[in-house]
Image: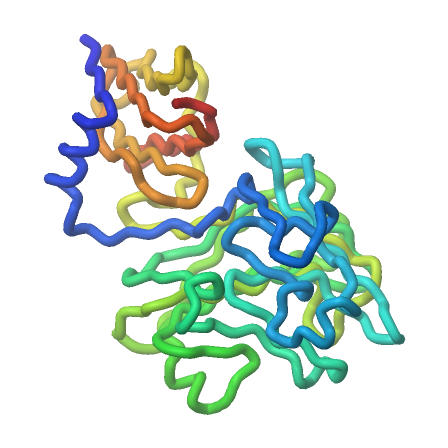
Amino acid sequence: MKYLFLLLIFTFVYGMMFGQESVFSVENGGFEEWEIPAGLDNSMMEPVGWSSLKTSDNSSLNNLAPVVWNKSTDAHSGNYSVYLKNKSIFGIVATGTLTNGRIHSAMNPDDGYVFTDTTDARWNSRINSRPDSLTGWYKYNSTGNDKGVVEVDLHVGYYRKPGSADDSTRLIGKAMFKTPPEAVTKWTRFAVPFEYFNDKTPEYYLFILNSGDGKAAVAGSEIWLDDISFVYNDLPALKKPLGKETLKVYTSFGNIYIRMVSDISNEYQVIVTDVLGRRIFRGKVSFGEDLILNPGQKGIYIVHVYNEKETYSRKVTAG
């Protein structure tokens, strides 16, 4: 039996069933969407929703700042990942850094920080939920004993890192992953839990992606990152992947087809999001059924299929 979910139908069903639920993914955590910020050229494209040293709030230093990031076609999935590299300038190591907030740059590295600008939507990312863990994929090339770092802080109000005592009172929870100080040449998954410091609900999340370990960063270290996401209890990070003998996901004439070809489990949950993390469909699929989804607008979508024991994710182009 086949179920055809056209855009208007599943938008209505989604709104009725899940309109009150607030679950957020990382904005452009797959780094598929890129743009040229005002005043920069094609060689300085930034991922949509992310910013660099070149778009810091210190315009007097932006032109002097080195380009320590790039769009890479070496991707874990989809077409692109983000590449960061530590570079030495004026005798100072500029760490390859991106944030979904904004960077405050300074000649003295001790005076630099990243921050959430609550007054400008370009430099903040909203959230009103408490994810369980942070996951993603990386490759790393270490110089010396350097380490790459992926960190995200959940907070309320204005927030900067490093910050003051006031900033620490606005911190709700955090998750941080550090690479081993060695070469990791194959795409490798990381997963780290969130640590919460109180029972409040966050308003914003602030990411810091670094190719080096803070002030101990070494010139030449480089990292590739892709498919960064938050994991919630209703979409657990499970160890056993679904195999091709169980599930088929493919596209045809703009539609996304999800077909269960094995009756190992009676039912699987299905979540489909766009590359900015916006959920466009949530439902179920069982053995002998096909889901046929038409997202309406052409683009890249992420299909998640899972149950209590198995999980599967794949990027597809549809619409």
Q: How many marks?
A: 0
In this rendered view, identify the residue nearer to me: 122 or 13.
122
Q: Decide if residue 265 is in sight here.
A: yes
Q: How is the image coloured?
A: rainbow
Q: Residue furthest left?
A: 16
In the image, is residue 112 above or below residue 77? below
In the image, is residue 9 above or below residue 103? above
Q: Please indicate whether residue 140 sits to the left or right of residue 25 in the image.
A: right
Q: Position of residue 208 (x, y in %)?
A: 57, 64
Q: Please indicate whether residue 23 sits to the left or right of residue 159 in the image.
A: left
Q: Residue furthest front?
A: 39
Q: Residue furthest bottom?
A: 165
Q: Position of residue 221 (x, y in %)?
A: 78, 58
Q: Residue furthest right?
A: 91
In which quadrant of the rendered view does residue 158 lie?
bottom left
Q: Decide if residue 176 is in sight here.
A: no
| Residue at left offset 31%, top offset 35% | 271
Q: Please indicate whether residue 250 sits to the left or right of residue 108 in the image.
A: left
In the image, is residue 43 above or below residue 288? below
In this rendered view, identify the residue nearer to me: 21 or 242.
21
| Residue at left offset 51%, top offset 61% | 100
Pick the quarter of the image with the N terminus. Answer: top left
| Residue at left offset 43%, top offset 45% | 276
In this rendered view, identify the residue nearer to me: 94 or 181.
94
Q: Position of residue 162 (x, y in %)?
A: 56, 81
Q: Please indicate whether residue 26 sits to the left or right of residue 97 in the image.
A: left
In the image, is residue 69 above or below residue 207? above
Q: Position of residue 136 (x, y in %)?
A: 52, 47
Pick the quarter of the image with the C terminus. Answer: top left
